[in-house]
Image: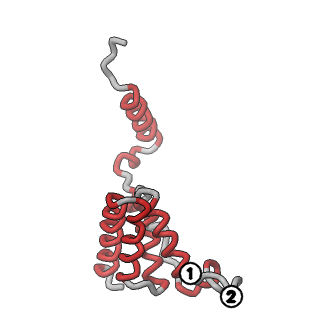
Amino acid sequence: MSDPTNPFEAMMKAGQDFAKSLNPDLESFSPKGFEDLFPTMPKEFMETFMGKTFNPEGLDAKTRLLLTLMGLTIAGATAESQIRLTVRNLRVAGATKQEIAETIAQAAMFGGVPAMTKAMEIATAAMADEEDEGK
């Protein structure tokens, strides 16, 4: 017990050292860069597999994605990459910025204001990136 090192910190350091030994480039790994590997789905693809194509009486793709965004927000908005990807796909599916903001705001009733604030920051940044790319 004389070791002042935090066991969690020691475990994290050991994991990081192991990852660096396997691939030195992992030291500069960015989850945001990893998101670029997942393209935004075309609207028709989303509607076919997530919308009314196979279930004409069901929810459309935009509604399903809005529900996904609400769930991610209520869960504490900790899945930042998933929120950004969902927002990107929502825009392609035809959701307005207002619809996205209202969905996140509604989630505050169930997930709390801190989760809503975090999700709103992530969504705003994702939509700003979209504008920067000229979409």
Does dot 2 land on a helix, a strand or a loop? loop
Marks 1/2 in contact by CB < 8 Å: the verdict is: no
| Residue 40 position within the rendered picture, expressed as x and y whole percent measured from the top left | 48, 76
Instruction: Report whether residue 34 is seen.
Output: no
Residue highlighted by disc 1: 61
Residue 56: image tag: 2
Q: Nearer the viewer, residue 42 or 79?
A: 79
Quadrant of the image containing the C terminus? bottom left
Q: Residue at x 44, y 44 (%)?
A: 23
Q: Nearer the viewer, residue 22 or 95?
A: 95
How many residues crowd around disc 1 within 10 Å: few (fewer than 14), some, or many (20 or more)? many
3 horizontally vs 45: left or right:
left
Task: Give the Cα separation between the discs numbered 1 and 2.
Answer: 12 Å
Residue 54, quarter of the rendered image: bottom right
Amino acid type of the residue that numbered disc 2 sits on in the rendered structure: Pro
**Direction top: furthest residue:** 2
Amino acid type of the residue that numbered disc 1 sits on in the rendered structure: Ala
Q: Residue at x 55, y 76 (%)?
A: 64
| Residue 41 position within the rendered picture, expressed as x and y whole percent measured from the top left | 52, 78
Residue 22: image tag: none
Does dot 1 land on a helix, a strand or a loop? helix
